[in-house]
Image (tube, rainbow, N blue to C red):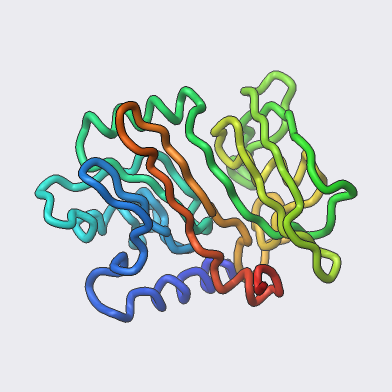
Amino acid sequence: MQSRTIAALALAAVQWHGRNMFQDRVLFIDGEAIVIDKPAGLPVDRPRDRSQSLEDMLDQLTFGFQRLPLPVHRLDRDTSGCLLLARNPKAHKRFGQAFEAGTVVKRYLAILDGEPAGDSGEIDLPLAKVSTAETGWRMTGDANGKPARTRWEVVERARGKAMLAFFPETGRTHQIRVHAAEGLGLPILGDPVYGKGGPAVMLHAAELTVPREGKPDIHAEAPLPVRFHNMGFGRD
């Protein structure tokens, strides 16, 4: 709950400059695609608590088009960074197919609650969804689950914690969060489901590349958020 409160305050902070909170958060735009730097605390789809979501704000992302853009993929509510939206149905279908085919390159940054023994590696841990009446649903490693693979490398170490770059080769729900917690034994700092929780979830979608036939790739990089700097990472 504390992490939600902090995220809500951070979200409010990016709205101060006027109606369009995305004015300074567009990382890429052309006639068929937009990539925004989604702030932590903003869900992509309308949540059960009916709080504000990206779905409610798509009219701020038309930029002269009559049609509302549509998200091609999802980021967790408390994850910030690169989010791709399509500006027409044909583009939405093509981009979706690129994600399904595994041709989209994604790089995430995360601060872990500890340090891995090595400097790089690959996690091959199938994932399955489990649910209980007491705790709700979550993902977990399961040999009979859906294949899930993530490459990782250490970017920086400080005060017993480490910032890692994660390169997911598949796109399972909560993949990086579970692979950090179960594959490495080190949950993402602030993760309320797979870790100890805290003021903020330290996971950021830092880079996205989507190949396009006959056109330049869609490429975007989202700057490291202040919450990472406040933890002593990425200041150089």
Q: In which quarter of the image is residue 137?
A: top right
In the rendered view, tell whether residue 1 sits above or below residue 103. Answer: below
Image location (x, y in percent) of residue 136? 59, 44
Left/right placement of residue 118 relative to residue 12 reads: right
Residue at image coords 20%, 37%:
88
Q: How many labels does the image show?
A: 0
- Relative to residue 81, is residue 51 drawn left or right? left
Residue 68 screen position, x and y as percent: 18, 47
- Residue projecting furthest to the bottom: 16
**Residue most extreme to the left:** 66
State the residue in front, 113 or 143: 113
- Which residue sits furthest top? 144
119 and 213: which one is in front? 213
Q: Which residue is drawn at 41% across and 49% down?
A: 83
Residue 7's place in the image compared with 188, above or below, is below
The percent position of residue 53, horizontal first and vertical second, equals 34, 57
In the displayed structure, does residue 60 sit left or right of residue 142?
left
Q: In which quarter of the image is the N terminus?
A: bottom right
Residue drawn at x 36%, y 51% is 35
Residue 85, given in percent of the width and then of the height, sits at: 32, 45
Q: Who is closer to the viewer here, 188 or 195?
A: 188
Point 31% across, 34% down: residue: 215
Please say if 137 is above or below 190.
above
Position of the C terminus, as image quadrant, is bottom right
